[in-house]
Image: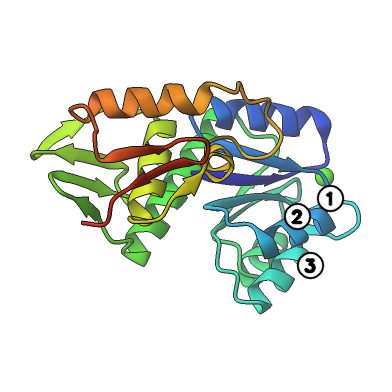
Amino acid sequence: MRILLVEDDELLGDGARAGLSQEGYTVDWLKDGLSAEQALRTEKFDIVVLDLGLPRLPGLELLKRIRSRSIDVPVLILTARETIEDRVKGLDCGADDYLTKPFDLDELSARVRALLRRVGGARGEPQLTYANIILDPASHAVEMDKEPVNLSRREFALLQKLLEHPGRVLSREVLTQCLYGWEEDVDSNALEVHIHNLRKKLGGGKFIRTIRGIGYMVEKQ
Ligand code: CA
């Protein structure tokens, strides 16, 4: 799950990023509205956590712009403004939920989780099946031979990405980005380690093929 965090306050942004990363989300953090708008036009995110008071482009304006372009990513707004009018305005502009500052990190994580569940359920994201494996994006669950498989969030993200594109080689860059976003320092072996663990948990996982020097793929069934 990839989150775009848009927050210009260093301290708050840093805390939110740390808290959400710890939950296993991939967090990309941008500090102004215009960069966020550009990112949303070109990249895919599962959810946006959006501050309203932002330099270069205010949060509400950003929200209006992306909704007018039919970018329907779920948006959780962070607002220091406590008036009902402001909240209503945010929701009218296309926000899905809001959180009033100051908030606690556990509450932020819980809201993000709830929103992802709600949206996933509403969109009816289809289950992905591959041989004896079923991956359910809405409930974030994986089963093999009808038994639950316990995957870390990063392993889950990786498996989901691979199963969404059977028959296609996914480059190391694409897979690494789906794991970490842009800003985190990535250990060059991290992808291999996650693939290794994923295979181990999925009975050897021979269906995940290594394409030497390029990346990984699962064969078309
Ligand atoms: Ca702000």
Q: Secondary structure beneath disc 1?
A: loop
Residue 187, compared with residue 24, is above or below; it is above
Residue 84 seen in this snapshot: no
Provide the residue designation for mark 1: 32
Residue 27 seen in this snapshot: yes
On the image, which quarter does residue 126 sit in?
bottom left
Along the line of sight, which residue is nearer the eye, 122 or 219? 219
On whether ligand 1 comes within 8 Å of the CB at mark 2, the answer is no
Question: On the rendered structure, is 191 left or right of 205?
Answer: right
Q: Secondary structure beneath disc 2?
A: helix
Q: Give me the residue at 38% from left, 46% from top.
A: 217
Q: Amino acid at mark 2?
A: Ala
Q: Secondary structure beneath disc 3?
A: helix
Question: On the rendered structure, is 127 left or right of 8?
Answer: left
Residue 54, compared with residue 111, is above or below; it is below
Q: Amino acid at mark 1?
A: Asp
Q: Nearer the viewer, mark 2 or mark 3?
A: 2
Q: Which image quarter is the C terminus in?
A: bottom left
Provide the residue designation for mark 2: 36
Q: Give me the residue at 60% from left, 76% from top.
A: 70
Percent x, y of residue 3: 58, 45
Q: Residues within 10 Å of mark 1 (few under 14, many from 20)?
A: many
Provide the residue designation for mark 3: 61
